[in-house]
Amino acid sequence: MSVNGNLTAAPAANAPAAEWKPRIVAFCCNWCSYAGADLAGSSRLAYPADVKIIRVPCSCRVNPMFILKAFERGADGVILCGCHPGDCHYSTGNYYTRRRMALLFSMLDYIGVERGRTRVEWVSAAEGARFSKVMNDFVAKIRELGENVKVGDLRCKE
Amino acid sequence: MHRIGVFVCWCGSNIAATVDVERVVAEAKVQPGVVFAQDYQYMCSEAGQNIIKDAIRTHALTGVVVCSCSPRMHEATFRKAASLAGLNPYMVEIANIREHCSWIHKDKEEGTEKACVLMRAAVAKVTLNVPLKAGESKVVKRALVIGGGIAGIQTALDIADAGFPVDIVEKNATIGGRMAQLDKTFPTLDCSSCILTPKMVEAKANENIRLITYAEVEEVSGFVGSFKAKIRKKARFVKEDVCTGCGVCMSKCPSKKGLNEFNMGLNNRSAIYIPFAQAIPNVAVIDKEQCIKLKTGKCGLCEKVCTAGAIDYTQQDEFIEEEYGAIVMATGFRPIDASKFDEYSYSTCKDVVTSLELERIMNAAGPTGGVLLRPSDGKHPHSIVFIQCVGSRDVSGRGKPYCSKICCMYTAKHAMLIRDKYPDVEVHVFYIDVRTPGKNFDEFYRRAAEQYDVDYIKGQVGKVYEENGQLVVRGVDLISNEQIVLNADMVVLATAIEPDPTARKVANMLTASIDTNDFITEAHPKLRPVESPTAGIFLSGVCQGPKDIPETVSQAGAAASKVIGLLAKDKLTTNPCVAHSDELLCNGCSCCEKVCPYGAISYDTKLINDHGVKENRRVATVNEALCQGCGACTVVCPSGAMDLKGFSNKQIMAEVDAICL
Amino acid sequence: MNYSYYPGCTLKTKAQDLDRYGRESAQALGIVLEEIEDWQCCGAVYPMVRDEIATKLSAVRTLMAARDKGQKLVTLCSACHNVLTRVNNDMRTDEYIRSRANSYIAPAVPYAGETQVIHYLQLLRDEYGFDNLAKAVKKPLKGRRIGAYYGCLLLRPSKVMAFDDPENPRIIEDFVRALGATPVVYGMRNECCGAYVTLKDEAQARGNVDRIIRNARIQGAEELITACPLCMYNLKKHQDGSMPVRYITELLYEALGLGSADAEVAVVDGACSACGRAK
Amino acid sequence: MQRVSEKVIARARELMREGTVNKVAGWKAGEFFYDCAPYVFESEEALKDLVYDRFCAANLSKYMIKNSVAAGAEGGKVLVLLKPCDTYSFNQLLTEHRIARENVYVLGVGCEGMCDIDRIREKGFKGITGVDENADGKTLTVHTLYGDGEVAIDDVLVNKCEFCKGKAHMIFDELISDNEDEGPRGDRFAGVRELEAMSPADRFAFWQSELSKCIRCNACRNACPACSCRKCVFDNDASGIASKANTDSFEEKMFHIIRAFHVAGRCTDCGECTRVCPQGIPLHLFNRKYIKDINEFYGEYAAGAEAGQRGPLINYTLEDIDPAAVSDKGGN
Amino acid sequence: MQMSEKDVAALVKEISGSDVKKCMKCGKCSATCPAYGEMRFHPHQFVSMVARGRVEELLKDPTVTRCLSCFACVERCPRGVEPANVVAAIRVLAEREQEGSNISPADVPKLVAGDPEIPQQALVSAFRKYRK
């Protein structure tokens, strides 16, 4: 299976209109997922350039406000990566993340941001291949969903 | 005004092949606040670092962004360079355009575009950076070990050998712990006392070790490097420095009906007693609940016979206050109460015993002088049934959900020793699984089955009851799929072990976290197994989880080396990227305190001057020496009073903004 | 002290001794037992599968009657006690069963397990007090060595029954002691007597009873007592008659000096008045 | 409710007279009979204006943050009248160490549901001059300039009372209530479920249409007992979300979403936000969504049912569901 | 509609309310079972076979009726599996399939005639246990 295949196939085949590029923000914890992303890089495991990574010390540092901000600014997807439950560098951080994000994502869906646009994935520092696969899958999903609603317009009805 | 410098690395062709570095530089130059931008082949090289240093000086830079490899690789390098040039090292941010960009993209246009976004995000962040300074705190060069079993003794000996003073606080009248009660040890079958007592003596003799026995830690405050502990030394009613341990008082004491704890209550002891012959310190203690003199004022016999004049009925509890740089928990374990499983008739039949009781029965210094005799009538047993997993792996609510780890091996040991010494005794062992990972462990168990003809039956026992002075054991043999009824003279229960009940109290005092089974949680289950998440607290022995003697000793040594590493430092440098609470904004709600894994947040009532209005408020304070900077607290703070230095709300929001431009 | 009282079918027919002596002893102790009006059979066995609701309804009706009177519900027969306690627990804790049962019965006020079900022995221990009972004893049963036979239904499942330590119970021993006799503890006292299987295969029940009586005898019991008519039936039928078996209330009646309770009572024949429909 | 009302007012006076308390937090009628507003009475004399009727919906818990401290400083105590639903908020504030409990005397007052003047008007009444509760306790007589009429109380309850949590007080020092607790009324999550059943696009349209009505008057924030920060993040420049400089409209746009998350796990569903919103935005639909999710994901939790509870967002279990369960459920 | 063996096993799990996966195969249920000798399959086998979806043999076995419902296995199971509930579920499903096969009202006069001491409780229990 070619990971790269995903990258090139989609736009060429059926995207005659002005090319839309999804904007995707990835929050990665410093100890596991950011290192996993580094490993994906050093293993040359490609994933689309639409993904931009922000480094945080722990997934539990991610304030729901950051995610809302991204969507307000027009992000099409936000993904949060942390150490696997039980492996948190700070012992318990990702357990809190798990609760916060489950509730936040459910709320985002409730205001009309489809569930597929938000995701939490647990990626360890050793899982470079997984990091790449996760990102490819996520981008594919976002492409499938298309452009996001303008969350920024939530209070600007014509 | 911000004066940011942006430095774009080619990393040879690693970056430059997929990222148009010149375009990144050009793009950087038009970012607000950026006054200088340059690319270079290898920024991490000395020449590259010099470019950064020169630019900092020449352009009076207030912030630096290096677009290069992962910060996990060279962040420290560039921070150091900046600091050498006079810039605060925390004013440096890295844009990872190699691992996260050039290495994963093939299309140069795409790669360049992304590199520009990452650069923009780093610039946006660095404009909000503030200079941070790593703090320092003192290290008191003394350690406290709570618990004087083999774990505590070994840890203390190792710390003391490295030249640091260490106190052992033991709640019982002697050190030695559970290991002192054991007869032989697996898998070598050497005598437990023979290997333990020399260590006890060594602990007593070591001038760096102070033994505080018959004592409990009452209060602990402070943090890593400088804890303060208050220790209650319970009254022994015997002057410790005067008593010679001759034991005359014990023989003369008229109150002899106390249960002998050391022998698991299988026989009695006098009210004044020395727990066992090799006790350290070898000093008597009076059980005040049992002593006639202390209860009624009459008697005083021990005082009369004590030629050393060591008895003091007026002795009071004493308090010792001491400062420590590190604390080791070595609080150990106890077997669970077997009467919770009375289908095995432990409460009603004397000949149903726990393994630790059997250990005493087998021991030469035990109640039967080491001769295997039935507790009910003192007769020689002809058949013994061992039942494993009594209360272990039990989620019914009666027992413990975990495997107690040591029972398979000690049961094999007991079975083997009995078969060896008394070949006429039939031995059956009911087991669910025999778990013997460990060096020479499985060989040991197989020897019991093959050489010593111990009858291992895969299955459990459902009921034990007494009939005609014998025990009827109804069990199942799952391999032959039949229910079997055996007559036995004794039944031995391999009861689960649980953390000593003092562990919970001590852990609370130390703000060390504890799991649902009351075992102390380690900072990281794989990478930091002997440290508590609370800095300066270390774990030794079974208080962290079930383990046997070799494992305990190696963990004790590991804990000691961690303590030594800490005490060897004169000062502790603290990570400056820690949480900080704005007192004016703090509601005092305690949410942050509850999610902090390190106990780094405390609440105090303080006089706050809120724009001229002075009032007493309950506000959070972060102890920077304890905080590790995870940021969990920042998210639960609804008012935004809690923020994380180096990863502040504003900084991360600025990055999001820059990426979603 | 007024309580709702649920005797159950067997106590009105084959086990009249259990009922009669229980009532009269209670009266002598100043405990008022008010029999639930128009009670129905409890169902005799607790329906163990979750999709059986209908068979729990008569128990719910009884529980509801006690609730409406605002009284604790006292039982005497072990089987009734087991069924009522467990159905009550279902009504309290199991939303599925609660809602289904309530919609079947459609009572004015839905039932949610409010009633407290207590066994006659618990009544004596927890409400009246064994120490008070000991004081009320007129003819202590001195010198009698009595084995308690608990069986299964009073004790298990212990999480629901919450009657006593299921593996080392002591309530009947304490009761025996309060009456002035000597309790004999033996291991088989909480093992099954053979129960209803006696109708299918006498030999199976006989095997069980053999083991129980043998163990009791060897451990020194001279007579056995029980609170269950079915245990009574099995224990008497499947032995040679050398081990007397009595109801707990017979012993109580005797110790309170109310007369001698002879185990031989005329058998009242005929159909079960309350649960006739089962036939 | 008449009987309880009289007893409550009498008792408040008595406590003031005895000196048990030196302040009373209650309700005072405003310009119109239906605008009963929170008021702190400082003398027995002033208490003549204390009312307790079908229009005293306001939750007084939040007022105890400042008043309990103030009362303590004066060496006195403040009496607060709390309806059953208000006690949840009071407990939650105790959990968060916001109220000096020792300075508060809680008088639990029975409540049979509060009425919404707008809903009465919707029944066709114009020129309302007064409302009286009828003896049956189920209907109101509405006096208008054009004559009297009758309306069923159940038809004009404020939203929060339509979905009353129950008549039991979670905390009190003294209780004046005739009510038997009948448990919760109605299915408070029905509205949430209705929205959940819509498509994401319809949901977005729904919220866009509702939230566009918002005039950022902060009434919700001011009334909400969970929104009791000394300084709101939206007013805090360092938070990165405040909009003082007007360079950023984030706060403008996301205010309600952020507010809902900030009170998630702490909101007692007291319904004040929706009740006070001048634009009639159903803000409770945010809070109830969180409550419903919390109940479903982590087990039933009622904020404020007990003081000292550990809220669901500052807690976890090893077996918690993964956010993937949420991400995948819809799928689209 | 004919259910597959797997579906029946799922039904057994559902109506028994027992989580058979929690079993750690220690055999304590069978060690404690007073009807062990009379039953072809033993409590631990019931749990294991239901877990593996093999219920056909269990449903055909007439000795399932020998379970005394004494709850010793439930009480003593260290994993909270409740084997007796699994046995009961099998018995009930078998009885539902073959209406009234294990005891019939016609048997009663014979039983009572043979032994007038039989308590009502035994008859009602047997009816409840042995018939649909």
Image (cartoon, coloured by chain):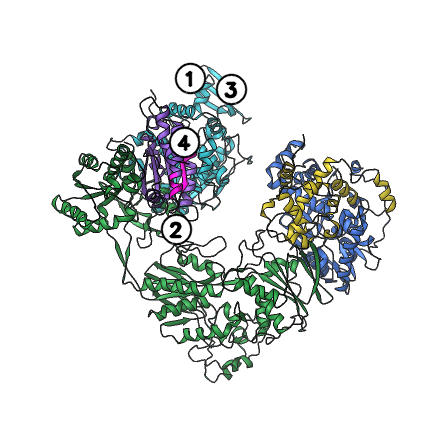
Chain colours: A purple, B green, C blue, D cyan, E yellow
Span highlighted in magenta in the image: A104-132
| Pointer 4 residue | A141
Count residues near mark 1 (Cα–Cα under 10 Å), then give few for <14, some for 14-19, many for 20+.
few
| Pointer 2 residue | B597
Q: Which mark is residue D127?
A: 1
How many marks overall? 4
Pointer 4 and pointer 1: residues touching (CB < 8 Å)? no
Q: Do marks 3 and 4 share a subunit?
A: no
Count residues near mark 4 (Cα–Cα under 10 Å), then give few for <14, some for 14-19, many for 20+.
some
> Identity of the amino acid at label 1?
Gly
Q: Position of residue D16 (x, y in %)?
A: 41, 41
Residue that appears at 49% across and 31% down: D189
- Distance CA(mark 1)–CA(mark 2): 61 Å
> Identity of the amino acid at label 2?
Pro
Q: Quadrant of the C terminus of chain B?
A: top left
Say whether residue C22 is magenta.
no
Q: Do marks 1 and 2 share a subunit?
A: no
Closer mark to the observer between disc 1 and disc 2:
2
Closer mark to the observer between disc 3 and disc 4:
4
Pointer 3 and pointer 2: residues touching (CB < 8 Å)? no
